Image (cartoon, rainbow, N blue to C red):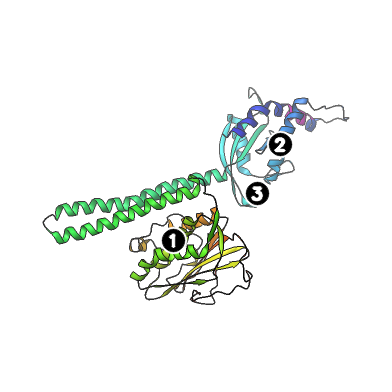
Amino acid sequence: MSPSVALVVGLVLGGVVALTVVLGSRRSFDGPRSDTQVVPLPEASMARRLLDLMDPAVLVVDADDAVLLANPAARALGIVRGTRLLVPELLELAHAVRSGGGRRTDVRLPGNLVGAGPRMMSVHGVRLDSGAAPPPGPVALVLEDVTETRRTEAVRRDFVANVGHELKTPVGALSLLAEAIEGAADDPEAVQRFAARIAHEADRLARLVRELIDLSRLQGGEPLPELVPVPVDRVLAEAVDRTRTAARAKRLDIALGGQAGLVVRGVESQLATAVTNLLANAVAYSTGESRIAVAARARSGFAEITVTDSGIGIPRQDRQRVFERFYRVDQSRASSTGGTGLGLAIVKHVASNHGGSVSVWSEEGLGSTFTLRIPLAAAPPEASASDAPATGDAVAADPGKGTA
């Protein structure tokens, strides 16, 4: 239980009991009454004010499942209508608390009630009577939103499982190759072949570790360095230079163009890594002799850096997942491309840390266009953002594509 929930339960339960007595007497009073017949206790008034100011949602439900009290946080969740509690799981929890004492559990609230998608709530139920004799009394339910906490826990579990799986592959390969070399000590040709494979797997392992460290830093492991003016031309030139050898090996041409002279605020090394990862991804998934286009332009206060290829494209169902860690569209191609599944996740976090975004347009068989948007440091000196023409030959392979 979080400190905020513990504070609510520990400090105001006594006041809630008093408030519940007052409310219950009002509900059960059958005869004529005046304003002076039921006077709220000071403790109840203070408890009600405190509950109204607290973030956790608090409900008090009587023995007939009628809601005696719901603070504004509870009503904002949409789980109460009048004196009715609309979530069956919460009613079941109230019954369990009434018959067996305090309970803690997670309850998923439907998106149609909350209005912002399903929410996971940690619920602490407490009996407000002594429990010594029937009839059972009211039950207090304290709800805390743990949606993000549970999501983070799930992501962490998946991350650890994925890292273990990804590390196991090259480590296992290195072990087998070492055994193969030992068994082929009298065959220099075989030893040379196995040694080349060991170097390949070692490089893959080193790249995976390096990208894991980069991703950890980008996700908050280290504070973000100070953002300074960075020329986009320099970032693009560095990224192209890093990727040119791999592109030439596949007989791919990288065409660089677009609007020159743009300046963004950022960390040059991170931006160069992001564009390099986009280019490396384009090289890995392009086939035959084709062109990869890299261009930049100013638009709506952002520098838009596009990387366009005419490769295999991305299926529609995978387009929103390609930026997830370790996600690969085609697992069978992982060994042939040498990718770790972290490159695009790194791009996403670089964009986010710079106040920008990354998106993708793609069609199977036609290729893909990735667009990295980074806020400009200052308005470009010439040509407005909307009518700045692209120069050079870094244009999309299909002019009808556009960018996502």
Magenta span contains residue 228: no
Instruction: Find the magenta span and give its range.
Output: 18-25
Q: Earlier in the sequence, mark 1 or mark 2?
A: 2
Badge 1 vs badge 2, beta-carbon distance below 8 Å: no
Front tag of 1 and 3: 1
Residue nearer the viewer, 207 or 104: 207
Question: Is 287 displayed left or right of 260 in the figure?
Answer: left
Q: Can residue 138 be seen in the rendering of this structure?
A: yes
- Place of residue 262 in the rendered image (x, y in percent of width and height, measured from the top left): 56, 65
The residue under label 3 is 114
Query: What's the amino acid at mark 2?
Result: Leu
Give the vertical position of 83 relative to 253 (above or below). Answer: above
* Disc on res. 53: 2
Q: Can residue 318 be seen in the rendering of this structure?
A: no
Query: What's the amino acid at mark 3?
Result: Val
Front tag of 1 and 2: 1
Q: Quadrant of residue 74?
A: top right
The CA span between labels 2 and 3 is: 20 Å
Residue that protrudes farthest toward the left in the picture: 186
Image point 37% across, 76% down: which residue? 289
Q: Earlier in the sequence, mark 2 or mark 3?
A: 2
Query: What's the amino acid at mark 1?
Result: Asn
Residue nearer the viewer, 25 or 205: 205
The CA span between labels 1 and 2 is: 48 Å
Image point 70% across, 27% down: which residue? 17
The residue under label 1 is 277
Q: Quadrant of residue 93?
A: top right
Image point 19% across, 59% down: which residue? 192
Q: Residues within 10 Å of mark 2 (few under 14, many from 20)?
A: few
Residue nearer the viewer, 353 or 265: 265
Q: Residues within 10 Å of mark 3 (few under 14, many from 20)?
A: some
